[in-house]
Image: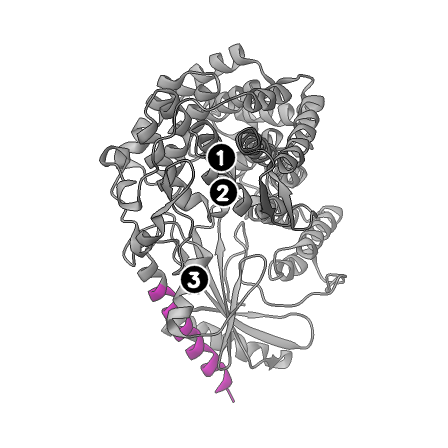
Amino acid sequence: MTGPAGGGRSRGRTRAWGPDGGGRDRRPADALHDARDMPDGETRIAELERVAALAEATGDWRTALDAWSELVETHLRGGERWRLFEPVRRCLDATGRAGGPGGAGRRGGPDDETLRRYRRYAVEALLGTPRVGLDPARSMLDGLADPAATGADGAAIVTQLRCRIADHVGDEPAARRWLGQWRASSPDPAAGCPDCLPVRQAELLAGWGDWAEALAAVEPVLDGSARCTAQPEAALTGALLPWLRAGKADRAARAHIRAYRRHRVAPDGFAHLPTHLRFCALGGHLERGLEILVEQLPRLGQPHEDLSVMEFAAAGALVCTLAADGWGDRAVHRPAYRRRPAAEVTVGTLAAELLAVATELAGSFDARNGTGHQSGRIAAWLAERPLAPPVPLPRAEAAEPDDDGPDDDEGPDDGAWGDTGPDGGTWDRAGPDDGTDGLAPDEVGALTVAMITAALDRRGDGYALDAAGTVLGRWGDAMIQFRRAGDRGEILHARVVAGRRLPTARRAEAYAFCNGWNRDRLLPKAYVHDPGDGELVLAGEVTTDLAHGVAPAQVTVLVDAAVRTGVAYAEAVAALP
């Protein structure tokens, strides 16, 4: 059989599965192969858990390792990282039984660096949710500190995590000590993105009131040398409150306008929204703060870490409280969120609702941690008041300061920046309307679903978009789906399924066709899939790593190529005898 190798990354997926998962009498490796073709969701998660448990029961530790690894990747994509703790633990157990870190007896599955990343993800889950216990997380962290268990020196990861845990539970002296060791440790690829780690350090320092040090921490990222697609917006957001408290309100305003433009729509932008809301509250931009809050409330119904939800609710409650102090019983249209129906409510009512969400989550964190630190943080946020009279928020073209990073043309939506709120500032009410997050055709940014759909819109093609962000369309005999894959959604994955199927009796012929296609054609990578229903599915895929960003014009070229080659592939299958 030809096709992509089966580790870590999820393949293209089109087969519909029933609740029983199908294929239960097959070998674990075969069942895992089919589970990888399932769409992300609870059915896929349940099937991967079943396959992993079956592989463990039959002593097939290599398949168990692959299945648990696939489950970890699924939870990473799904946004509920707290659910990956147990799969990581089982993955590590399967690794030991399959040969151990770097062991000659282990074949396939995640490599040692990926396993160390998994351990980090599991410990980080402690910081994001109270549903992971302190003791299991600390045990996982102790394993990271053991070179015999990981096959590497984990100082950069261990000191980072110990620092962040100490800060999370309110032990600032210990957190400061660990921060010093973290900064002195040697770089480690498994410790996280090197451009994002300084932002984390800046957030810690800002939380302790060290504004100047926080700004110094993000300065290297803001000088234009960062290669991460999350930058410079994440660094600009980390500098918002330090700049505001340092009396540099104009610079903070420019940073907010530029960074929110990305965080407004980016899937990974939700965690930054609390800072944008606090900037609006402390900078006196209450009208804009309410606009952002109301626009973003529906995202509370999506999977996010509990810590981000708590902070968003607390920052939103602060904005509403200050608005109620100044405007009394002003009404706003509250969209539906967290099973609450849409309604017209006063800002005071909305403040109370959000405060209840924040205090409940803070109490859960504190009950798990045995401290009152998170509740104290929320109370301190709500006690804050504007630091200075508001400065006008800049127009789009003025939001690109020369010293805040590389130039970033604002694109065609400059006309949306002329609305003036009661606070006297000008700001953007409207989002981008061209499906490319406001990027110019040759402007590089992170891959988004909007870029994919915009490329199809320009072609005039019809398509469907599901809740997971998968774009699906039909071109003749070719069914093609596009999706974002990878930890950051940085991979464009296109999968084509030919409309014609072959009977299983023609398996050798199907393999020969795919081998010949892969020998003579560059795209797509062809393979045969047997769903177990008596017919063979002939599919192909194109995977493009866009970790360093992509321009909308480039996405258009990639989509065109995937459709053109996918249609040719399906036509070739249809032409078989």
Q: Which mark is residue 551?
A: none
Q: Say if the magenta span includes residue 564.
A: yes
Does the magenta stretch mainly form a helix, a strand or a loop?
helix
Q: Residue 274 appears at what percent x and percent y?
A: 51, 34
Label 3 environment density (alpha carbons within 10 Å; few <14, some 14–19, many ≥20): many
Q: Which badge, 2 or 1, is on the more N-terminal residue?
A: 1
User: Furthest residue to the left?
Assistant: 402
Task: Look at the image and tell me whether residue 228 can be seen.
Answer: no
Question: In the picture provided, is 422 more to the left or to the right than 72?
Answer: left
Question: In the picture provided, is 55 more to the left or to the right than 379?
Answer: right
Q: Which residues are magenta?
A: 556-577
Task: Look at the image and tell me whether residue 408 can be seen.
Answer: yes
Q: Which badge, 3 or 1, is on the more N-terminal residue?
A: 1
Q: Residue 36 appears at what percent x and percent y?
A: 60, 58
The alpha-carbon separation of the residues under discs 3 and 1 comes to 30 Å
Q: Which badge, 2 or 3, is on the more N-terminal residue?
A: 2
The alpha-carbon separation of the residues under discs 2 and 3 comes to 25 Å
Residue occupied by mark 2: 292
Q: Which mark is residue 277?
A: 1
Q: Amino acid at mark 1?
A: Leu
Question: Disc 2 vs disc 3: which is toward the camera?
Answer: 2
Question: In the picture provided, is 552 more to the left or to the right than 3?
Answer: left
Q: Nearer the viewer, residue 444 or 123?
A: 444
